[in-house]
Amino acid sequence: MIKYIKFKPASRLFHLSIVLIVLGLISSIWAELWQLWFISVIIILLISLFDLWRVYNTPAPTIKRNITGSLSLGIVQQVQLIIKNNSQTNLVVDIYDHFPEQVEVNGMPRRLYLDSHEVAELSYQLKPLQRGDLTLLQTECLVLSPLALWRYQHMLPVFNEVRVYPDYAPVIEYALLATENHLSMMGILKHRRRGQGMDFHQLREFREGDSIKQIDWKASSRMRKMIAREYQDERDQQIIIMLDCGHRMLAQDGNLSHFDHSLNAVLLLSYVALRQGDSVGISTFSHEDQRWIKPVKGVANINLLLNGIFDLQPGSAVPDYSSAARDLVLRQRKRSLVLILTNLRDDDYDDLQSAVQLLKKYHKVVIASLQEQAIADRLEQPLVNLQDALTVASTHVYQSKRELLVKQLRNSGINTLDVSPENLPLALTNTYLDLKTSGQM
């Protein structure tokens, strides 16, 4: 069903109008041409009205849009339009698919030449610029009249609703490479230890390099040879990711904000942890729309975590670590590995220290702070004038205070990562694996 329609003159009608104007000026000088001008106006008016009537009675094309139900942030996606000419005549049609502001489109508008009842396909590229729900409501169709004097506009309702998720390509890559021999290809280093895990795995023959503590003397006596216990890393442990949704996470590095980089890291870490047999939960803070996803287990639940945070956007609040820590202690009683993803400032120390000391009573705590590439870029720029020198000097002071904060946190026994956004996913995942294999979780 057509939502609304309207028409506007095409370029050919403008050209004819200019001809009439010129002819009218000439007839004002030579009166004997007045009748010719008047007849020309009547003829063109009748022809244009007849052409308008014909295009008005031409059925609108039907359009169907094919697009996947889920898109990845910043990843180009092909969108297909299927257009059918429902009329008995050939049509020249300009197609423009309407899209929201949070996407970037390449390949619109397009012109099609359709024979009677012909079905044509066209595609264009759509790149989401923001996570969340994306709604495509309508497609604009401009039909050129048979004599090319009018362009008749049809606004056709073509509804599609899709979700824009964080880029999950690293997770897919991990799924393809996540074997014992290929983890290092991604930079994820899994340090294996022999017989020093926390959970009993099996009995086997004693090997060179095994610890004497591993020997099972009763089994050795029965088998009349040295038998060792082999252990594996603990399973069914819990990881809680505390995600800062404050204004600092709006900082942009490359095409993604710090918050989007953090979501990518959360996704990769969650997949790895779920695959290791652990449970993963998520707690957000410094945002009106605070969310709590209870720890879930099993790789199949990665979708539950993803759907719980895919539409989150950082707000304008200042991070409140103490309040977030109190909330988490009330929600999560079982000892867990708590990972705090944030962007630290030098004036955060007191509040952060208080929050961490509270969390450490119940959990193992790791802080991951994102560096800002703009700071490093500013320090590398040449000094041209006094203003540049003052800016670089103040940037050095800021950087020194921030590095001091990270050093203080580490000296107080808090495992603290200070990494660039693009390195966060692997750094966070490797930290988790290191803590797991060392039995510190």
Image (cartoon, helix red, strand yellow):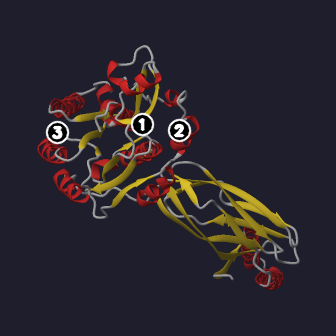
How would you rate the neighbour count of disc 2 (Cα within 10 Å): few for under 14, some for 14-19, many for 20 or more? some
Q: CA distance from mark 2 to mark 3?
A: 35 Å
Q: Could you tell me if the residues under marks 2 and 3 are in contact, i.e. CB atoms within 8 Å?
A: no
- Is residue 354 toward the left or the right of residue 340 in the image? left
Q: Position of residue 104 (x, y in %)?
A: 55, 54
Q: Dot 3: what SS?
A: helix
Density class for disc 1 (Cα within 10 Å; few <14, some 14-19, many ≥20) is some
Q: Which mark is residue 371?
A: none
In percent of the image, x 55 and y 33: which residue is there? Answer: 179
Instruction: Determine which of the numbered discs, if any, sits on residue 422 in the image.
Output: 1
Q: Mark 2 — residue?
A: 174
User: Disc 2 marks which amino acid?
Assistant: Tyr
Question: Residue 103 placed where, x, y %?
Answer: 53, 57
Query: Could you tell me the amino acid type at mark 1?
Result: Glu
Residue 301 visible: yes
Query: What x and y, as percent, mark residue 343?
Result: 27, 43
Q: Residues within 10 Å of mark 3 (few under 14, many from 20)?
A: some
Vertical placement of residue 74 versus 18, above or below = above
The residue beneath circle 3 is 346
Give the left or right position of residue 284, taking residue 38 as reference. Answer: left
